[in-house]
Amino acid sequence: MRYYRPATTAQAVAALASESQTSRVLVGGTDLLVAIRHRTAQPTLLVDIKRVRDLAPPIAVDDEGVTFGPTATMSDVIAHPVVREWFPALVEAAVLVGSAAIRNRASLIANSANGSPAADTSPPLVALDASVTISSVSGERSTPLRQFFLAPRRTLCRPGELVTSMRVPRPSPGSSSAFERMTRRRGVDLATCSVGAVVDGDGVMTVGLGAVGPTTLLGGPVTPVDLSSEEQVYRAIDGLLAAATPIGDVRAGKAYRTAMVRVLARRALTRAAARRADRDLALPQVLGGTAAGNSPAERTSRGSDS
């Protein structure tokens, strides 16, 4: 296995294309290096892009939204004041990615680019209408993140290509978001199911769904409902969850996932609507030492209030 550190994006994509089937991009390495150690990935070439000069900066804000570069870490996302204000669901999801040490290295873009249906940050990003830019020796193309996922661990980013940025549009006035995740145990674990919810200023609801299908799924948008009416809320949730196709595995049975994703959707939508009303954007204080498993966004199968 060889290691290459390019200085430009052109050099990076040329190197990836030269051994397209066996080259891999190295950014944070939190998943890739573990896979190499366990021999589930055996690349012949590692292309380290952390020193590429012309990549998008980690986080760039303008009036229309936020652009994330490949080197933006989960800790960068959590700490950025504009991201916290505009995208609370994304921050809540980033808080739950691994340990503090992992969050200091793990790339936001790579978390989605891996194509795992259980990735924590993909559901809120899909609900927030994120898009990605993919670069290759042939040029660039952009696609909505909701269309980026093809199957478990398969995306539109083909061998020899590189996701060079992610764009999340500025929320519309009066909108907000929230994230809920269910795991088998607190702390570092993969999602049993998860929901990122957005409620806009008119009460229109959209959700991103994790670990209840072969890819991260988009539900909605659906028209406003009276959140004080349980019947209306669950009718809307049934519409939002129509795309979900949960399976049974070692983490949970199909029936349990089906039931719990409805509970998580209700919680996330309720919290997003409350934030929309009072702009209460209080977030888990991970930087102050609160454990990720104690955040209001995470639920465990033991002791849940389902």
Image (cartoon, rainbow, N blue to C red):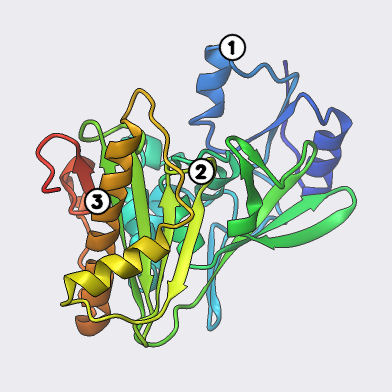
Is residue 109 rendered to the left or right of residue 292? Answer: right
Residue 207 lies, with reference to residue 52, above or below; the image says below
| Amino acid at pointer 1 | Arg
The answer, for residue 281, to whether it is visible in the render is no
Residue, disc 2: 111
The front one of 98 and 100 is 98
Q: Residue at x 59, y 16 (%)?
A: 40
The amino acid beneath tag 3 is Leu
Asked whether residue 69 is in view, the answer is yes
Q: Which residue is mark 1?
A: 39
Query: Residue 82: x, y in percent?
Result: 39, 72
Residue at numbered disc 3: 287
- Say which label, 2 or 1, has the lower sequence index: 1
Pick the front one: 235 or 262: 235
Please identify the quarter of the rendering in which residue 25 is found: top right
Q: Is residue 195 left or right of residue 35?
A: left
Question: Percent x, y for residue 295?
Answer: 19, 50
